[in-house]
Image (cartoon, rainbow, N blue to C red):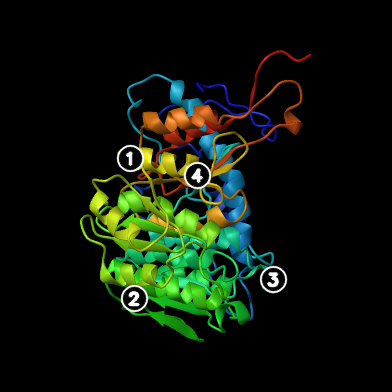
Amino acid sequence: MGNKIAHGDLCSVRRVRRGRPINADVPATETPEAAAEPESKSPPPEEESAPPAKAKPPKPVEKATPQQGFPGALKLVGGLALLGIVFLLIAIVGGGGGGEDDAAEAPAPVVAPPAQNGGEAPAAEPTELGYPAFATGNTTRVGGADPAANAAGVALAVFPSVTAAQRPAAVTLVNEDDWAGGIAGAVLMAAPVRAPVLISAADGAPDATEEALGALQPGGDKSTGGATAFAIGEVAAPGGKVTKVAAGSPAAEAAAIARLRERLSGSPPDHFVLAPEASPELAMPAAAWAARSGDPVLFSATEKLPKATAAVLESHRGVPVYVLGPSSAISSGVVREVAAISKQVKRVSGEDPVANAVAFARYDDEDFGWSINDPGHGFVLARTDAPLNAAAAAPLSASGTWGPLLLTDDAGTLPTELRSYFLDVKPGYTNNPTRAFYNHVWVIGDQEAIDVNQQAEVNELAELTRIGNAP
């Protein structure tokens, strides 16, 4: 990719000297009094700078109420997406310079929300809801620092909630320590329920979740049984009608969620996905498929099929089962146990988490599997060491560009297996790019999870390229 990056809507990008913040050339919102003050050195990131003596203090940010809606959230999405493109390009173009500070990484920009109603802009705050803070032509980042922030950002990206028609009828609340409940709960994002996952805790919801709930304002409807929230395990739930799934083992929670999905949808599932309860990084891709298809995720131990899982399979003997992961995660003995119950059992696997996710993205068995072996698709990319992000990102696989979850195991380096897959499905054209197929990748997490250099490489691999000679 180098330093040659072009985006049609950006006229020029200045080269940035090392030692300068990457947003140094972006004008800040100032009051007239503040503009008259001389420049001062920026404080360290941990400190807050006091406003100039003559400057008016910023107005406090009012929390949205159900009557007010949440218009600021959508303004922030647009502003961050646009400014994020500029910041990312400047950071990459500036990467080729020399000097003693080359090893230092420029800090991620913090963008102040726009002023509302003609007033002054509130103080700049980090993007706590994980809105897309950086974007390239072929990638969009939901840059939350944790799964709660990422889940809130994804939910608002899928359900902008400007009008009642854009709001979900319900949300699914999952405990911040329950990755298995989150992956199994992703099935409630599938039609007809379409409840995005949000992260909570027994003693209260994180601020990001509270703010997302204030914007989403789920009201319940027939598809949710009147519920405004589905609470999985020990979680604090909002007001309204809440349908609870009791806390338990991964197998017990997943079995209860499968029964809930069947009750709400009014029909048995087409398939089951059996995931390893002892290997969350191998189970992660199941969340995206469950959200896209409505196929419930069940869990198994490595050497023994849990009773709760067996009971669900016994009640659906005609439903095919797909085992996700290699025999080191779910043994051949367990597969034989399942085969004694279900008429059809097949394994989808790769030897490590990255290869396992790619294998699932490629898999095709008639009406089961993503079958993505050609260009023109969406993808979601997350880190293997944050399994709850699979649940947080699941709504992206059931809307928009409808893509599978792919995994990277390092912040800075794109795994070879994943790079080869992206090359294999790289889009191209001969003489008319506007009639071509395009790929798009959602990147989940901040730069500590997946840094900007890896995002830039993914962007290049997803870029439409000319192939052959035009006739």
**Mark 2, residue position:** 233
Question: Image quarter for residue 449?
Answer: top left
* Nearest-to-viewer mark from 3 and 4: 3
The answer, for residue 283, to whether it is visible in the render is yes
**Label 3 environment density (alpha carbons within 10 Å; few <14, some 14–19, many ≥20):** few
Rendering coords of residue 116 (x, y %): 65, 65
Task: Classify the position of the C terminus by image quarter.
Answer: top right
Q: Nearer the viewer, residue 76 or 110?
A: 76
Question: Which residue is under mark 1?
Answer: 409
Q: Given the image, on which type of amino acid does mark 3 rest?
A: Ala
Q: What residue is pinned by disc 3?
A: 165
Q: CA distance from mark 2 to mark 4?
A: 55 Å
Name which of mark 4 and mark 1 comes first in the sequence: 4
Image coords of residue 344 (percent x, y): 42, 55
Q: Are marks 2 and 4 in contact (CB under 8 Å)?
A: no
- Say which amino acid is labelled 1: Asp
C-alpha span from label 2 to label 1: 29 Å
Assign a secondary structure to mark 2. loop
With respect to residue 315, does 131 lie above or below?
above
Crowding around mark 2 (Cα neighbors within 10 Å: few <14, some 14 to 19, many 20+) is many
Crowding near the residue tagged with mark 4, few <14, some 14–19, many ≥20 C-alpha atoms within 10 Å: few
Percent x, y for residue 181? 36, 67
Q: CA distance from mark 1 to mark 3?
A: 38 Å
